[in-house]
């Protein structure tokens, strides 16, 4: 009932007959061509998953360009290799070191594959495997203090194996360039011919695997190189696992020489581009002209959202970097800021640090970013925070937006910005869920029907909505979590009974970083300002009115949202309720506040929203509230 799959457990057809028993210390061989199998393995890379009859995963091995175990060659007219655990039965969950090529396969008996000694000796240091013309060339580097002969060593691309010719030696601390069809001889007729996406394996004369490196999408006539010489992992199988963009770099070839060329620093505004240089696609149709390239930038950290490794704090796992004023360009439409994604962020940065970052440019959620996740990808140049922050200035934003809204904000994407207008808190509904406010220029925003001139019409409504969009901006918190407790704003300390923000509160000179992002759930993408520690936000709360305003007339009508007024079973039990109070004590506190507010309004007619829909019987929420009003104001009032 057990089976083998090439993806995951869950729906496999049994490959192993139900009567099969593997003896202690014994073996059982499965062929992918057996009747009833459900897997078909790829030569370039795949997964081998062993599942029990209940679809539980027992073991998993990934190989080739999918995982770290090597891909066994099966070249035409050459030896048919297997990939075997070494030593026999060894399983440390490290596929790169648990498996090796075996040129004499032993299915059904003890494995005898050579040992694995990754990183123990000579390394593949640079590869020119995508030349416009000519053969593949590889640079081997010897980090030791003694010369090493590599004559009789082996190299493979997973399709065939080649033996290095006589007379080849890598000098101590030096380099050796080996060339396809010149310095090696293939065992089969398939040939060792590396492509723009491939894995290279290096073996010593005892066929012990000493190095492997993987890549994808090499630029034609460039080289992949370890920077600095010998740096990085020795068990890579693709661009990411080989620390691509950090210590494994796509750059101009330096075969036979050091891999430490002078670094060309790219300006952030050149990465961001403008409407002329940006490519089509993406959420705002604004793909970076350097999308997919590896770049090195230097700038000042203007906002830090790295978070704590291993803690689900909802932080952005990165930071915002801004070009110094002295390096900014004269094009107002190009942003001088960018988000740096660092994953687990092995290099700590803080606001005000001057840093150099090397990583790959990509588009994520409509934002251009640099991915720099390796420990060596980020260098802290100095920590003179006050002096460094003086090197950058916030861009000024003046609402309402003129012209296309996305184009307007795009020129400030990722930058430190400051709003010249006094902004008003116009919406707080999403504050407890997402930690965000909506702010508006020119006072609180109103519904179309509140100020519209009759008769209502679609043109006026569309104009109203356009005006609202141009006057508002979201002020977010420092994370993408939902239902944070306490709510982030206002700082310090977060939201509380004594530290609160009221609708209509104002903010002057709001300063933060401009970010196109979601709030923590799909469909919430919007331009938003993220707070920074060096620019604290002060809310000026309006005075709480002491009573309802006098509006004249003979009949006073009021409405009130009672925020899920649910009274349990109406007899003091039935808590927690489905939407309202969690206890009788909470209901009592809610009731006291509602009663006080309604009585102070002194209205003749009150319309209630969000009250439990159980109007029948003396135990209903509505009856409870009316009884409480009469108790406070007097019976019959």
Image (cartoon, rainbow, N blue to C red):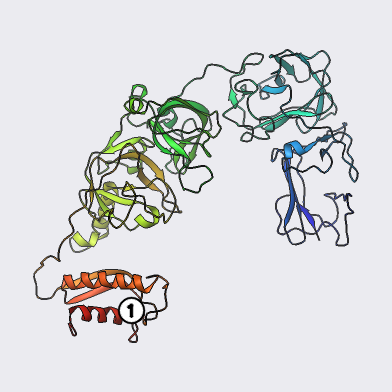
Q: Where is residue 430 in the image (x, y as percent from the top left)?
A: 35, 56
Note whether 185 is above or below 633 in the view shown: above
Note whether 246 is above or below 365 in the view shown: above
Please name the residue shown 55% across and 31% down the image: 375
Q: Where is residue 260 in the image (x, y as percent from the top left)?
A: 58, 17
Note whether 21 is above or below 224 in the view shown: below
Lateral position of residue 267 relative to residue 23, left or right: left
Please name the residue shown 9% across and 72% down the image: 553
Viewer-closest of 135 and 60: 60
Q: Which residue in the protein does label 1 denote?
A: 621
Secondary structure found at label 1? helix
Residue 187: which quarter of the image? Answer: top right
Viewer-closest of 180 and 591: 591
Q: Where is residue 176 in the image (x, y as percent from the top left)?
A: 72, 15
Note whether 464 is above or below 86 in the view shown: below
Please name the residue shown 86% across and 59% down the image: 17
Q: Please state, as top left, top right, bottom left or bottom right, where the C terminus lies in the image.
A: bottom left
């Amino acid at each position: 009932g057990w089976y083998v799959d090439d993806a995951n457990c869950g729906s496999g057809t049994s490959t192993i007959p139900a009567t099969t028993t593997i003896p202690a210390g014994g073996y059982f061989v499965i062929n992918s061509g057996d009747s009833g199998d459900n897997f078909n393995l790829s030569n370039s890379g795949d997964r081998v998953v062993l599942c029990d009859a209940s679809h539980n995963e027992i073991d998993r091995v990934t190989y080739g360009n999918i995982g770290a175990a090597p891909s066994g060659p099966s070249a035409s007219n050459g030896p048919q290799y297997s990939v075997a655990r070494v030593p026999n039965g060894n399983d440390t969950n490290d596929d790169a070191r648990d498996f090796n090529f075996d040129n004499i396969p032993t299915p059904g008996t003890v494995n005898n594959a050579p040992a694995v000694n990754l990183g123990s000796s000579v390394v593949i240091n640079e590869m020119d495997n995508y030349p416009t013309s000519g053969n593949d060339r590889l640079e081997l580097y010897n980090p030791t203090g003694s010369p090493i002969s590599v004559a009789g060593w082996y190299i493979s691309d997973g399709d065939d194996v080649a033996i290095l010719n006589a007379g080849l030696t890598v000098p101590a601390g030096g380099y050796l360039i080996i060339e396809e069809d010149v310095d090696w001889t293939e065992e089969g007729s398939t040939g060792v011919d590396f492509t723009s996406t491939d894995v290279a394996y290096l073996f010593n004369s005892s066929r012990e695997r000493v190095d492997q490196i993987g890549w994808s999408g090499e630029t034609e006539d460039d080289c992949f190189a370890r920077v600095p010489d010998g740096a990085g992992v020795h068990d890579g199988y693709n661009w990411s696992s080989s620390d691509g963009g950090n210590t494994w770099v796509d750059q101009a070839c330096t075969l036979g020489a050091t891999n430490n060329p002078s670094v060309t620093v790219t300006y952030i505004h050149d990465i961001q581009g403008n409407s002329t240089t940006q490519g089509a696609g993406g959420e705002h149709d604004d793909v970076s002209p350097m999308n997919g390239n590896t770049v090195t930038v230097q700038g000042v950290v203007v906002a830090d959202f790295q978070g704590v490794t291993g803690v689900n704090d909802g932080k952005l796992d990165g930071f915002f970097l801004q070009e110094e004023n002295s390096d900014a360009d004269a094009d107002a439409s190009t942003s001088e800021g960018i988000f740096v994604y660092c994953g687990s962020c092995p290099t700590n940065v803080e606001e005000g640090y001057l840093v150099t970052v090397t990583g790959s440019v990509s588009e994520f959620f409509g934002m251009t970013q640099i991915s720099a996740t390796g420990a060596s990808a980020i260098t802290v140049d100095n920590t003179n925070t006050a002096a460094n922050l003086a090197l950058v200035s916030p861009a000024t934003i003046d609402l309402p937006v003129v012209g296309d809204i996305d184009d307007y904000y795009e020129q400030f994407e990722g930058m430190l910005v400051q709003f010249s207008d006094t902004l008003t808190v116009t919406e707080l509904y999403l504050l407890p869920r997402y930690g965000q406010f909506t702010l508006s220029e020119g006072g609180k925003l109103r519904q179309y029907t509140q100020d519209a001139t009759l008769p209502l019409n679609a043109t006026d409504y569309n104009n109203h909505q356009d005006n609202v969009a141009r006057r508002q901006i979201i002020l977010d918190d420092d994370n993408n979590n939902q239902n944070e407790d306490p709510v982030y704003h206002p700082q310090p300390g977060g939201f509380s009974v004594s530290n609160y923000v009221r609708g209509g509160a104002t903010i002057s000179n709001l300063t933060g970083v401009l970010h196109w992002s979601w709030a923590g759930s799909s469909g919430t993408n919007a331009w938003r300002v993220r707070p920074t520690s060096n620019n604290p936000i002060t809310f000026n709360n309006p005075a709480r009115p002491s009573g309802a305003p006098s509006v004249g007339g003979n009949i006073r009508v009021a409405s009130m949202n009672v925020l899920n007024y649910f009274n349990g079973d109406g007899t003091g039990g039935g808590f927690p309720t489905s939407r309202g109070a969690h206890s009788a004590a909470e209901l009592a506190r809610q009731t006291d506040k509602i009663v006080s507010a309604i009585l102070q309004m002194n209205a003749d007619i009150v319309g209630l929203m969000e009250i439990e829909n159980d109007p029948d019987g003396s135990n209903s929420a509505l009856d409870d509230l009316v009884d409480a009003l009469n108790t406070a104001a007097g019976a019959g009032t």
